Structure formats: C-alpha cells, structure tokens
Amino acid sequence: MRKVCFFDTKPYDKLFFDRFAKKNGIELIYCESKLNEKSAVLAKECDAVVAFVNDVLDEKVLRMLSGYGISLVAMRCAGYNNVDLKEAYGKVHIVRVPAYSPYAVAEFTMGMFLSLNRKIYRAYNRIREYNFSLTGLLGTDFYGKTIGVVGTGKIGQVFIDICLGFGMRVLAYDPYPKEREGVRFVSFEELCRQSDMISLHCPLTKESYHIVDKKAIGDMKEGVMLVNTSRGALIDATALIEGLKDGKIGAAGLDVYEEEGDFFYEDYSGEVMQDDELARLISMPNVLLTSHQAFLTREALKNIAETTVENIRQFFAGEALPNEVCYRCSKNNICKKEHKERCF
Ligand code: NAD
C-alpha cells in the first residue's frame, strides 16, 4: 500500500475517493487542513500528496515535501496556478485532472447569469418573508443579446453551446482561437466594448492576471453582466467594486475571488469578516457570490477521483504520466512529455 496524504478533505471527497483508492493499492490519509508550510509536516511519512485549488505549493512547501522524500503531488483539479512549477521541476512531479466535467462548470455559469438577470436569489429571499412584490425583479431576455466568452477551451466551448442554444450572439477572445460556426473571435478590447454579458473561462497566468481591470471595465458597456467561474485573480476586485458602485457593471456573478484561499470552503458565520472587499461585494444586491462550487457535481467528483487515483497508480508503476505538467510543457517541444516520457 502506498500512503498518500490528502489535504483540504471534505466529506464529499471521501465518498468518491474511497471507491477507487484501495483497489489500486493506495491508502489515503485524509487531513482537513489546507496544505501550507505549517501543515506540510503531516505528509512526512507519506509517499505522495493530493492537493486542491487553495493549497499552497510554493517554493518553501515544495522543498519541505521533497525533503520528506515525496516526489509526486497529484492535483485533484484542472488549474495549477497555485504550484511553483519551476521549483517543482526536477524534484516533484505534478499531475492534474485536465478535464473532469466541463458541463458542470459551464452549466453553473449559465445558472449564475440566469439567477442574476431574473433575480431568482432575491425572489427566494422575499418569498420566505411573504413578500410577493415583483418590484425590482425586472430582467431582460437573453435571446438576441451579445455574450463575450474569454477563453474557449473545454469549458468555454460547452458554455458557447449553451449560449447558442439561448439564441445569443457569441463573441470570443482566446490567444489560440478555435474557429467555429456561430462564434466571432475578436480582440479582448472589442469583446469588452460589444458584449452585454461577459464570461471568463481562461486559466490564471501572468498574461491573464487582472485581465478585468479598471481599463477593461471602462471599455465595457453600461450595465454589463460579468460572471467569473474561472480564477479570482482574473478580476481586480477594487476595480470591480468601483464599477459596481458607479453602475458600469450591472451585475456580477463570482464563483471565485482573488483572496478566496483565506475563506472559501470554511464556515465563518460566527465571525466578523476581515476582508473588507469581500464583505462589500457580499453586501451588494446585484452580486451573487458562491464558494468555488461550479465543479461540484457527482459526475465531476467521480471523474476527479478516478483520474487522480489513476495518475498516482501510473506514477508508482513507473509508467508515462499523460497528465503531468511542468513549466517547460508550455514551451514548444522542449518538454520531454511531448515524446511520451515523463517531464523529467
Ligand atoms: P482549457 O485549458 O481547456 O481552456 C483554457 C482556454 O483559455 C484555452 O483555449 C486557452 O487558449 C485560453 N487562454 C489562455 N490564456 C488566455 C488569455 N490570457 N485570455 C483568453 N484566453 C486564454 O481549460 P478549461 O478546462 O476550459 O478551464 C478553464 C478554467 O476554468 C481553468 O483554468 C480553471 O481556472 C477554471 N475552472 C474553474 C472551476 C470551478 O469550479 N469554478 C472548475 C474547473 C476549472
């Protein structure tokens, strides 16, 4: 049995991972703490680590893990912006789950747009107080409106299908456009200028950090609806709050937030919120904020567990690692994985 330390465990994780781990010779040691320099020691007697979106895998933590003899971190998610890939290279292999259910995230995204537009979350609260008034709940038809999709990878493509089904005009921005019928690829500036609704589906990189900043918001249409189910730091929260206050942004749906690592997935209902920007966003009637839950469907959790366990099995069996990522992977043909080997 290989011992694998599983950080930031939630009850629903156990439900799905227990199904696959044991039969593949893997013993999962479930820890509730997020991985960081204080908790990394919990992995000391283990052979590998399973981590998630808000775990810290910076230089210090990776050095600690490597010092304990750990040479595999299996991310149970698609994104790996929280991993210092340069530091990991040559010491710790990083594997991930590149796709588990683009439908889960794309469907949730449309759910956010619908809820914001027709104010379903506000109606729910009103009715609970026997307030049957419709004042303030006015929405618009989505049919015929222009939506701007930023990032047209797996999730972006499914989201575009949904928007086309609603009879919307679709604009898209992606540095690597995949031309398709019904979609017009434009620059990011033009997308901002022309869209009634904007949805973010690109990864967080140096180039996309704060892609929605004061300038981009300035370019947007008056009353634009903005939804981010990708990564929090794609949006500059200070600029977003200003845009919401002056009415430039008509509504915002946020499943992610730049500083979410300090709060998301935990219960702070008995405490005073220390993040003023998060508190301000939560206080606004035209902001719908959720706790990074767009992925949370049965199908997605099953696929995440199955692929993560398979990634770990492949590593210990000495096989190639198709789901490995390294900082050289993005540089054309430099990475060995292109030749069906491990990254190092
Ligand atoms: P993907 O790799 O299939 O697609 C990403 C697309 O973004 C690619 O087409 C790429 O060319 C494009 N891109 C890269 N840099 C860009 C930029 N600067 N501007 C515009 N486009 C850019 O990824 P995916 O599976 O579609 O996932 C997209 C993102 O969704 C992930 O990176 C992750 O951050 C997020 N995500 C969130 C959840 C959630 O629960 N909220 C779950 C899964 C994924």
Image: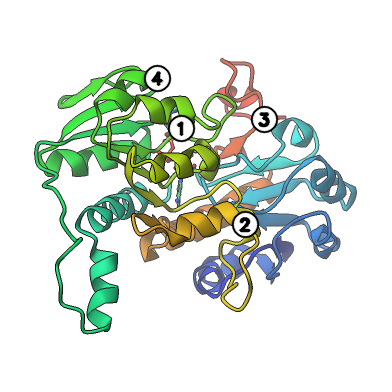
Residue type at mark 4 is Tyr
Q: Residues within 10 Å of mark 4 (few under 14, many from 20)?
A: few
Disc with the residue nearer the chain's start (4 vs 1): 4
| Marks 2 and 1 in Cβ contact (< 8 Å) | no
In this picture, is 95 found above or below 150?
below
- For label 3, the SS is loop
Q: Nearer the viewer, residue 54 or 304?
A: 54
Q: Nearer the viewer, residue 153 or 19?
A: 153
- For label 4, the SS is loop
Residue drawn at x 42%, y 27% as measured from the top left: 216
Read off the residue under disc 2: 275
Disc with the residue nearer the chain's start (2 vs 1): 1
The x, y position of residue 185, in whole percent, is 27, 20
Read off the residue under disc 3: 343
Distance, label 4 to label 3, CA atoms, is 23 Å
Left or right of 171: which side holds 6? right
Q: Quadrant of residue 295?
A: bottom left
Residue type at mark 1 is Val
Read off the residue under disc 4: 176
